[in-house]
Image: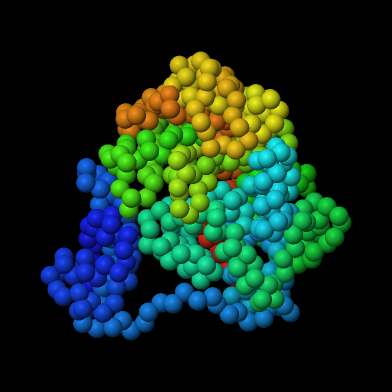
Amino acid sequence: MRKEIEIAMTPKQAADPSGWKTAFAHVLRIQPGRIKYLNPLQRSVDARSSKVKVRMKAELFIDEQPIEVRKFIRKSYNDVSRKIPVIVVGAGPAGLFAALTLIENGMKPIIIERGKDVKARKFDIAQINREHIVNPDSNYCFGEGGAGTYSDGKLYTRSSKRGNISEILAMLVSHGAEEDILIDSHPHIGTDKLPAIIAALRQTILDAGGEIYFNKRISDILIQNGKVKGVEDKNGERFEAQAVILATGHSARDIYELLHSKGLALEAKSFALGVRAEHPQALIDSIQYRQSPRDIYLPAAPYSLVKQVEGRGVFSFCMCPGGIIVPAATESGQVVVNGMSNSRRNSPYANSGIVVQIDPSDIAYLSEYGPFAGLELQRRVEDACWRASGMNQSAPAQRISDFTRGVTSATLPECSYNPGIVPAPLHEILPPFVAGRLQEAFLQFDKMMKGYHTSEAVILGTESRTSSPIRIPRNADTLEHISVAGLFPCGEGAGYSGGIVSSAMDGVSCAQAVVKKYRK
């Protein structure tokens, strides 16, 4: 007999898979030996009462074996080295999963990445932290694996209608991710483990006959008679194909400028901008779990906050329990911050982006920049933070309690941000329509999480790369650019996803659209 059931476990029970059958058998009032196979489906922490539980949903086979047990082994693909080539610009999740989908369908991906491979990229990231030097082609945003590789590897998405989330997760598991990501309600790989998984994905693509080129920044998209013909890199090397999947990420501003210079349509879209807030993890644990210290079998507590302030959403973004804050600038002359966690999430700090939704109508005073108005706002704030930092990668910072009062902090608490923090009036640096909403939101958040608004917490500027302020418009049916046949804008940089999983799913969709049109 097959049965699906959800039960509540103690954190200790949930942490020990060897005892799961016993826990389910107890609820069903049967002997554990009658459960021949247990397939965990979902696991989540339930902290709604004072006694924190873990809810576990599983598929059980009682008195019988399942017909088939799913195994997560790396697929072996047919050789595509002589098949129809498709250029994929960008080796982030959208580009990598587009390439894998092309291979599955008998087409040859040629991936062109402006940054370095995932291993070499680590040295440029270390240089930002230690020497405040930003390589504009290899940093936290650019390089193999994309922005998520060295900034956390969270896999949570609400975009279930865009594709098969489970297939994306299964592909990651077959390349080295823990199977826990298949059942956790907020799956997370961790910055310490994701690089090896990305390298394994690369090897699968190469083994199947795909090509990958690093350190090649695209300087031109070749178009003739309204059809794409290929791309050219900054050194004049050309790559030709009938189809180009453009998966360059939300910070590839030069690509937007290239498209605009060629007369291709771009659209302004809503985005978000704000700060990154950091609290002691023990404080967040005590608020969320109502216990201090937290149970050793419970994970570092996360939170999710959202509030409407003067008609705009103010919300937490990319929350990193047990994490650290990292520098995410993509060129000198700007300070940008982001957050990340390793797989164990064992840092003494919890951080999250706290950002304000910005609609194009909010920045009408920048209308002279056309579709680049949002990008201009990002640049102005990033530049102001750079100047406030002392013109290096130190971040301007303020205690939350001082920020809401509108005073510069005399002192700052300890912070995980490696390049360092300096006291600065973020309430003046941020645009008034952003700062004012943040000040009100922090007070409101304290009513939702008593103790959140505290002098122990610090905010850093600026969290400006939550998403792209520009969309590259595409045909809803073919997914091609509205005016160029064969050009497929894809992922976060095109304005159609946000995060690793939704970007991967959009990469799959764009590759399927290419296959539908060109494979004959």
Residue extending farthest to the left is 29
x and y percentages locating residue 29 in the rendered image: 12, 70
Colouring method of the image: rainbow
Percent position (x, y) of residue 104?
59, 75
**In the rendering, at what x and y percent does residue 350 appear?**
45, 40
Q: In which quarter of the image is residue 206?
A: bottom right
Decide if residue 4 is in sight here. Answer: no
410 and 104: which one is in front? 410
Query: Residue at left 81%, top 56%?
Result: 233
301 relative position to 437: left or right: left
Residue positioned 42% across, 35% down in the render: 280
Q: Is residue 326 left or right of residue 403?
A: right
Residue 315 image-quadrant placement: top left
Which quarter of the rendered picture does the C terminus lie within?
A: bottom right
The number of numbered badges drawn on the structure is 0
Residue displayed at 50% across by 48% down? 341
Image vertical order of residue 345 relative to residue 333, above or below: below
Residue 134 visible? The answer is yes
Query: Who is closer to the viewer here, 347 or 366?
Result: 347
| Residue 254 located left or right of residue 436 | right
Image quarter in which the N terminus is found: bottom left
Q: Which residue lies furthest to the right in this view?
A: 236
- Give percent across and percent down for residue 163: 48, 62
Please report the residue visible at 45 percent of the width from the left and 47 percent of the height from the top: 346
Residue in front for this viewpoint, 16 or 366: 16
Q: Is residue 119 above or below residue 85?
A: above
- Please determine whether, in this image, residue 364 is positioned above or below residue 147: above
